[in-house]
Image (tube, coloured by chain):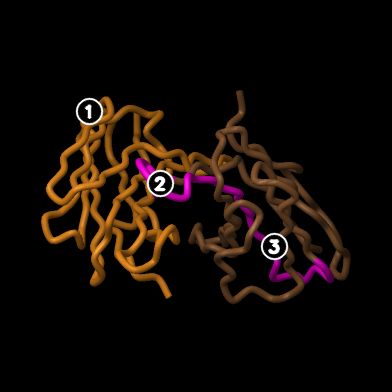
Chain colours: A brown, B orange
Amino acid sequence: DTAVSQTPKYLVTQMGNDKSIKCEQNLGHDTMYWYKQDSKKFLKIMFSYNNKELIINETVPNRFSPKSPDKAHLNLHINSLELGDSAVYFCASSRRRGTRGGEQYFGPGTRLTVT
Amino acid sequence: GQQLNQSPQSMFIQEGEDVSMNCTSSSIFNTWLWYKQEPGEGPVLLIALYKAGELTSNGRLTAQFGITRKDSFLNISASIPSDVGIYFCAGPKETSGSRLTFGEGTQLTVNP
């Protein structure tokens, strides 16, 4: 029944490591997003994919690379993790156009802690 | 930078009180969305507004899309302890397509 799911829920790792976060949605949406939420709870868009095509790429270090194998999945790979990468990362999805196209539905989040 | 001004930043109220929060922007929005985020969870969509002047309710929650399309408010009536959380306004600006801009959130605490 889960609409937008992410794994893992928690991720603790050391500086310099490479890690991935996975996201899946079963809503039939064609657009997916990655957001970063900092310690002040501010939500900032990182990437957006529509039908496996990158459409939004905010100013994010190129250590972050999204990958969309199909329109139901959007994974986030992070290379050479840094302390400042510690945050909660949310995946979201929406319809691209039409009725309710602006509504985004969020996953439960992945809390990344870099030590 | 952040372009949605959400206020207040935090509220401490007694159970049963009504709550009001709002968002303003210097830009025109096509849609206003209100989300609630509980600790350890992702934001959950509460109400979506699509037309200037629209007033929409979801249970004890009521939200309005401002006539100028640059503001929106959310009211919660007869608050209960489970209303605790962070409430975010969000929307795509007229020229931004599907890209959402988020407010900074209103942290609501309800004392039983």
Disc 1 versus disc 3: distance between alpha carbons?
A: 37 Å
Is A87 covered by the magenta stretch? yes
Residue under numbered circle 3? A86
Q: Amino acid at mark 1?
A: Ala
- Residue at coordinates 57% horizontally, 59% vertically from top-left? A48
Label 1 and label 2: CA atoms lie apart by 31 Å
Q: Which residues are magenta?
A: A79-103
Classify 10 Å Cα crowding around label 3: few (below 14), some (14-19), many (20 and above): many
Q: Which residue is mark 2?
A: A101
Q: What's the amino acid at mark 2?
A: Gly
Q: Which residue is mark 1?
A: B78
Q: Is residue B106 magenta?
A: no
Residue in front for this viewpoint, A94 or A90: A94
Crowd band around label 1 with a 10 angstrom C-alpha radius: few (<14), some (14–19), many (20+):
some
Give x and y (percent) for residue A59: 59, 76
Q: At label 3, which amino acid type do we have?
A: Ser
